[in-house]
Image (tube, rainbow, N blue to C red):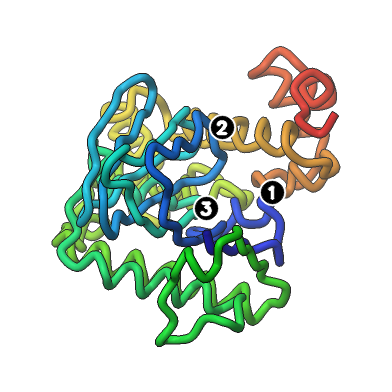
C-alpha cells in the first residue's frame, strides 16, 4: 500500500476550509481482506481499478466492481471487504471541510456508489497526489505490490506541498463533477432560502448577523426569515446557532484549543458570549462538555 497525509495544518484548521485534503493512496488487496468497521471524521472515496468487493454502511451491504467509485461519509460506521476470488485494486482520496458534504452529495446524491467512465484517469490523479510527497513517484510510476511489499506512507511537511495537495484535490473533484454531468448552476438557480442556507454554512465562522444574510440577498430581513422558515422549518438564526454549536462540540471533544480560540472559530468575539449560548442550548458549560466527552483524555 502507498499512501500520504497532510499534517501541515491541523484538522481544526482544515474544518474551516471549503475543501481540504486529508489523505490519498493506492493498494492491491489480498483475497478477502477486510478494512473496518470504522467511524471516520473525514469523507472518503475509493476508485475501484480492478476486481470487486463489498461495502457495508450502517448494516446495509453493497456490491462494488471495477469501474465504480464508492463513498463513505464522515461519521458513518463502515467497512469494506475484497472479494475472495477477484480482490480489488483501488485508490482513494480522503477529505474534509465546510463544503465536503455538499460536493459529495452533488456526486453521489442519495447513493454510495457511482459508475466512472474512465477509472484509470483517477488512478493517475491519485498518483499525482502521492507524487507531491513521495519522490519515488513520477508520471511513469506504476504501483506494484510485489516490488513495494510493505506499507509506505509519506507526509506533507511544507506549505508548498500542502497547497499542491489541496489544489489537486479540487482538480479531481472538478473532473468528477464534469464526468457525472451534474447541474453546475445549482447556486445561481437556487431559491432565496437555499442561498441563505449556503451563506450561513460558508460564513458561520464570521460574526454574521441575520441582517447580513438579508443584505447579501437584497431582501427584507423579515421576508428572508419567513421564506427560510417555510422551507427548513426553523429560522436562519436557529440554523446558524445549530451549526455553531455542533462545530463547537467537535472542537471541544477533539482539540485542546482554548475557549477563546473555539469561540473565534465559530463566529464569537469573546468566550463569555459563546459559553453562555453553549450552556443555554446543551445544558452544560463548554468546560463541562469537554471534561465529559474529550477524546484527548
Label located before the other in sequence (2 or 3)? 3
Q: Residue at x 61, y 64 (%)?
A: 152
Looking at this view, name the residue that lies furthest to the top. Answer: 283
Quarter of the rendering containing residue 164: bottom right
* Mark nearer the viewer, 2 or 3: 3
Q: Is residue 237 visible?
A: no
- Tell me residue 41's x, y (percent): 56, 40
The image quarter containing residue 271 is top right
Separation (CA) of disc 1 from disc 2: 13 Å
Query: What is the crowding at mark 3: few (fewer than 14 residues within 10 Å), some, or many (at least 20)?
Result: many
Q: How many marks?
A: 3
Residue positioned 44% across, 73% down in the render: 127
Residue 243: give x, y in percent of width and height.
Answer: 54, 35
Q: What residue is drawn where x is 61% and y is 52%? A: 206
Identify which residue is drawn at 77% across, 21% down.
289
Which residue bears the numbered disc 3?
A: 97
The span from disc 2 to disc 3 (Cα, nearest Å) is: 19 Å
Determine contact: label 2, label 3, CB under 8 Å.
no
Residue receiving disc 2: 241
- Whichever of labels 3 and 1 marks the residue nearer the N terminus, that label is 3
Mark 3 to mark 1 CA distance (whole Å): 13 Å
Bin the neighbour count of mark 1 within 10 Å (Cα to Cα): few under 14, some 14-19, many 20 and up. Answer: many
Looking at the image, is mark 1 or mark 2 nearer the viewer?
1
Q: Nearer the viewer, mark 3 or mark 1?
A: 3
Q: Which mark is residue 265?
A: 1
Amino acid at each position: 500500500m502507498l499512501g500520504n497525509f497532510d499534517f501541515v495544518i491541523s484538522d481544526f484548521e482544515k474544518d474551516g476550509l471549503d475543501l481540504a485534503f486529508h489523505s490519498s493512496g493506492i493498494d492491491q488487496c489480498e483475497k478477502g481482506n477486510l478494512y473496518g468497521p470504522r467511524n471516520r471524521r473525514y469523507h472518503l472515496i475509493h476508485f475501484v481499478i480492478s476486481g470487486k468487493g463489498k461495502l457495508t454502511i450502517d448494516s446495509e451491504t453493497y456490491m462494488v466492481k471495477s469501474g465504480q467509485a464508492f463513498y463513505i461519509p464522515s461519521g458513518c460506521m463502515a467497512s469494506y471487504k475484497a472479494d475472495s476470488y477477484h480482490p480489488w485494486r483501488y485508490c482513494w482520496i480522503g477529505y474534509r471541510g465546510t463544503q465536503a458534504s455538499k460536493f459529495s452529495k452533488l456526486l453521489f446524491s442519495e447513493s454510495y456508489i457511482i459508475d466512472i467512465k474512465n477509472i484509470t484517469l483517477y488512478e493517475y490523479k491519485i498518483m499525482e497526489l502521492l507524487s507531491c510527497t513521495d519522490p519515488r513517484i513520477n508520471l511513469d510510476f506504476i504501483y506494484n505490490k510485489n516490488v513495494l511489499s510493505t506499507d509506505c506512507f509519506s507526509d506533507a511537511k511544507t506549505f508548498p506541498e500542502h497547497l499542491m495537495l489541496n489544489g489537486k484535490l479540487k482538480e479531481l473533484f472538478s473532473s468528477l463533477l464534469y464526468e457525472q454531468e451534474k447541474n453546475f448552476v445549482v447556486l445561481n438557480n437556487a431559491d432565496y432560502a437555499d442561498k441563505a442556507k449556503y451563506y450561513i454554512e460558508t460564513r458561520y465562522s464570521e460574526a454574521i448577523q441575520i441582517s447580513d444574510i438579508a443584505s447579501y440577498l437584497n431582501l427584507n430581513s423579515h421576508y428572508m426569515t419567513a421564506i427560510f422558515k417555510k422551507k427548513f422549518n426553523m429560522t436562519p438564526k436557529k440554523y446558524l446557532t445549530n451549526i455553531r454549536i455542533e462545530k463547537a462540540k467537535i472542537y471541544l471533544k477533539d482539540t485542546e484549543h482554548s475557549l477563546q480560540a473555539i469561540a473565534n472559530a465559530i463566529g464569537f468575539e469573546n468566550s463569555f458570549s459563546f459559553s453562555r449560548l453553549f450552556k443555554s442550548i446543551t445544558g452544560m458549560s463548554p468546560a463541562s462538555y469537554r471534561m465529559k466527552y474529550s477524546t484527548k483524555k
